[in-house]
Image (tube, rainbow, N blue to C red):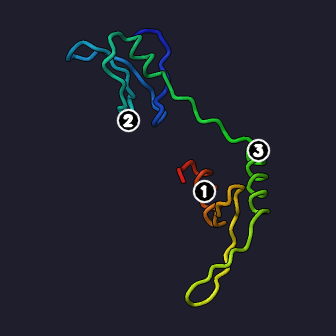
Amino acid sequence: MTDVHIELCPFCGGRASSSQQTTGGRWAAYCLNCEAMVDGEFSELDAIAAWNRRASPAPAISESEDARDAARYRHLRAYYTRVVFMQEDGPSVDLRAISEIGDAYEMQVLDAAIDAARKGEKS
């Protein structure tokens, strides 16, 4: 193995190594613990470079972003209206947020969308 630094395994934190594969002669870098592998590289340096390449972690949400989101949400909550629906069994009152173009959003829908966004899901 060359003297190039090889990162620990991104999955288990184990030590990694590199070797030339017996079939095809290509190079692989792999974890000595969990056997995660990057293979098929033409040189040992390419295999190690591929192993060491990591996706950038997602940036943490700062408090200022949270505060901005909370202010927007409070604004939406401030401009709610009570909507009375006439149903067969009598009137039903519901709280809705009304957008500038007149669309009504149920507060529970807004809550669910915000909760999903905080978890990184699509709403």
Q: Which residue is mark 2?
A: 34
Amino acid carrying mark 3 in the image: Glu
Q: Position of residue 116 (x, y in %)?
A: 58, 54
Frontmost of labels 1 and 3 is 1
Amino acid carrying mark 2 in the image: Cys
Q: Position of residue 94 (x, y in %)?
A: 67, 75
Which of the 4 quarters of the picture holds residue 32? top left
| Disc sitting over residue 63 in the figure | 3
Q: Which residue is mark 1?
A: 113
User: Dot 1 surroundings within 10 Å: few (below 14), some, or many (20 or more)?
Assistant: some
Q: Position of residue 79 (x, y in %)?
A: 77, 62
Pick out the residue farthest to the bottom: 89
| Residue at 24%, 12% in the rendered image | 25
Q: CA distance from mark 1 to mark 3?
A: 19 Å
Badge 1 marks a residue whose secondary structure is: helix
Amino acid carrying mark 1 in the image: Ala
Q: Is residue 37 left or right of residue 121?
A: left
Badge 2 marks a residue whose secondary structure is: loop
